[in-house]
Amino acid sequence: MSKIKVGAVVYAPQVTVIWGIIADYFKEAGMEIETVFFKDYRSQDKALLDGEVDIIWNPPLAFVECDIKSNSKATYSYMRDTDQDRTSCFLTKKDSGIKTTEDLRGKTIGFGAVDSPQARLIPIQHLRENGLEYNKDYKEVTFDVALGLDGDHEGGEYDALEALRRGEVDACVTTDNNRRSWELSGKLDPNQIIVCSTTGLYDHCIFSVREGFPKDLLEKWEQILSAMDYNNPKHKEMMDMEGLKKWVPGRRSGFTLLEKAVDYLK
């Protein structure tokens, strides 16, 4: 039976449950997984680059880091359907007079954690592309919750929203997914807080694959993964926890905005 080492960061308690279900599913399909857990994405990336694990579940910044540090020799595999074509938005109070990206000039903006692609890096690149330069045309305030997890949580983004409510910042940044979730739960009143700007599309989490991983094993891994069926109750439990309905082929094109941001911010 084929056996591969798969890395995952424990960013929340359910991660170990999710990977237990995935490991059982793969074993039944003829591929054994040894899951290796990490506390943050820097150590997980290092393990992949050192050849200690074969495949890792990566957020965008860690994926780009792997690509840079491996000179693009580390490759990629599948991602969730919900990882494609994501956006982030700038929120402000309805009565603030801020209605466009240009209106953010000279304002104080609350971002998520300093290492968050969706709540800081990509939004900063968005501002740049609309004529607002970092460290010049606006004041940045970061809400650094759980550094090392690449913003793989909503903590810093919600703290930024709270700062907006208190009047400590003029605008804040979050993902459109979080904004919609907060509206549905009543945490955000769309009659009081509005979207003044939205980033371009980007992709989110993706499996990174170590350099030299056998092509036949990767093909088998992808075949088994893509066969996971949301209509199967055993699969649905895990897929609901992980927030997807289908595994789809990954793509590099969805990381262009982030790559530009990483270069811009050095």
Image (spheres, rainbow, N blue to C red):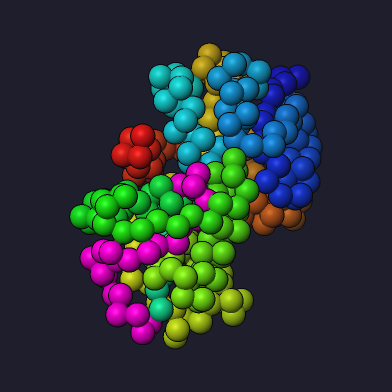
For residue 100: magenta?
yes
Residue 252: % across, % down? 39, 36
Left or right of 194 on screen, residue 189: right
- Judge by depth and name the residue closer to the eye, 169 or 15: 169
Looking at the rendered image, the quarter that the C terminus falls into is top left
Q: Nearer the viewer, residue 66 or 250?
A: 66
Q: Is residue 261 above or below residue 5?
A: below
Is residue 103 or residue 77 the one in the foreground? 103
In the image, taking residue 87 as reference, residue 225 lies left or right, namely right
Q: Residue at x 49, y 27 (%)?
A: 66
Quadrant holding the N terminus = top right
Q: Which percent across, then down, holds residue 265?
A: 35, 39
**Residue 100 x %, y %:** 26, 70
Q: Range of the magenta residues?
A: 94-117
Q: Give me the residue at 41% from left, 37% from top.
A: 251
Residue 126 against residue 266 in the figure, above or below: below
- Residue at far left of view: 131
> How many numbered marks, from 0 up?
0
Residue at the spot x=69%, y=22% of the render?
4
Decide: is 141 above or below 79: below
Q: Taking 83 as reference, is 55 left or right? A: right
Residue at image coords 37%, 54%: 123
Look at the image and say whether residue 103 sits in the magenta stretch. yes
Q: Is residue 101 visible?
A: no
- Side of 36 where 261 appears, left or right: left
Q: Residue 12, position in %: x, y?
A: 71, 49
Observer able to see residue 213? yes
